[in-house]
Image: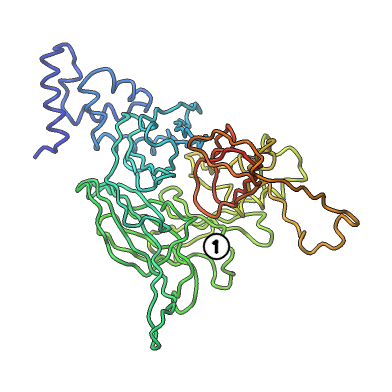
Amino acid sequence: MDSENEQQIKKTKHQNEKDDPINGFAQLPYEIAIDILSRLPITSLIQLSFSCRSLNTFSRDPHLVSTHLSRSSMNGSECLILHSDYPIHNQLHFLQLSDKKVRKIDTPFALSMHEFSIIGSSGGLLCLINTLFPESINLYNPFTRDHFEIPKNFEFKDKVAVYGFGFHPITKDYKVIRIAYHHLMATNSRGSRANNNRQLSEVQVYSRRSNAWQNKGVVPYRLERWSSPGVLLSGRLHWVSRRVKFNGRLERTIVSYDLADDLFDVICNPVSSSVSFWRWTSCHLAALDGCLCVVVPVPPGHVAFSIWIMKEYGVNESWVKEYTIGVHNPVSMISHESERHHIWRHMFGKKKVRVLCILKSGELLLEYREGDLPGFTRSVYKRDHALITPESHVFSLLPDWHDYLKNHTTEQIIGSTDKQPLLETPGEEVHYNQHGLLLLEGQGIYRLGDSWYPVQAGDAIWMAPFVPQW
């Protein structure tokens, strides 16, 4: 029986033969057409998809997508989707590693979702989440420019959540996974509420096939926020748990979720139990050459990191330490040799360097977040306001200083707000006293004066008297 896509393609081909009888491609059998198109570079495939109706229909065929992805991985024509969190207006770019050219990708959803993050990429689709309103999630094909907003779900609103996205080749279904922290409180014998130390999470799954969310209940794991989004491999998503009792001792584990049967499983971590837990706070997961891997800093000093690879998926005894990478920084990013050791430790300890993939040449591709290096800052200092971001914070022991500014007397200024003129500030918040704030969590856009700034957890803001803010 023909699939729905094949039937649509055959119907379109029949119409094209009437409209354009000299279009020889439209007369080819489905299997041959798919085979030809799957061998084209992605840039050529994009151009052809806009040339005629039948090719445009082919570009949306899941079998073409999977075949093209398979051929691309085999012939070394890897590509990357790059996300630029340019303030207020995020952007996407496409990098074909074979020609090292970066091309901008249209974002037709930009008017409704200015700020977004990528939850995952699978089966030719990107899963994007609105960073200001996380209930809004879009599935987007960056090459056909088709996008679809999945139904909003407000059940986990105001809860901390980790995410995952993936396509399973057997079920042929795309799923979005959302796992929210749920800390269970129990009642003790005296009737008061007590913490029973059980780390629980609630799970919800969106299926593209049913176009609906499903509540999958509670699981006995609490996942680390920094391990979100989950790493997709072998039809399963993977995250790192917080410390739980596993095999009789407290340790972090790798939690997997099977996209086909909706079941969770636990994979033991490759690091010896004698290693202290804090090392895992700076690790991350990745998929290298079809294998699950864990990237872990090497003590002391975090001046190197090791890459452990699970050679046989699901077999805990198959973990092998495959690579150890020492101090390195791109010359164009660090100017002074004396800074390199310190900067590497700072970068890896705060996950500013990340392992992306392994190329067919055997080289590892690493991501460096330039914006978090010294000399690059979001901090802004103006006459009536200041945004002081974490990399610009100066930590001191000021409260413990003695004889600070000895013999200095603070000038007293006495006045009345009643004598100050009223300012016309429609829709704005204005204070007559200077003040500040520290953003504890989340992110957004903040107006100070006539400027708009992206802000996030850890940012400090100073506002002079009468500065408009919003």
Q: Which residue in the structure is indicated by mark 1?
A: 280
Disc tally is 1
Look at 20% across and 19% down and name the residue there: 25
Look at 86% across and 54% down and name the residue there: 409
Q: Residue 109: percent from the left, percent from the top?
A: 36, 33
| Position above or below: 143 against 315 | above
Q: Residue 180: percent from the left, percent from the top?
A: 38, 60
Q: Residue 75: percent from the left, percent from the top?
A: 40, 34
| Position above or below: 7 against 181 | above
Q: Which residue lies furthest to the right in this view?
A: 407
Q: In which quarter of the image is the N terminus?
A: top left
Q: Which amino acid does label 1 sit on?
A: Trp
Left or right for 87, reference 395: left
Which residue is more in the foreground, 447 or 388? 447
Look at 18% across and 16% down and name the residue there: 24
Left or right for 111, reference 296: left
Element under disc 1: helix
Which residue is more in the foreground, 447 or 148? 447
Look at 75% across and 57% down and name the residue there: 396
How packed is label 1: few (under 14 Cα within 10 Å), some, or many (20 or more)? many
Q: Residue 157: percent from the left, percent from the top?
A: 37, 55
**Location of residue 42 (image quadrant):** top left
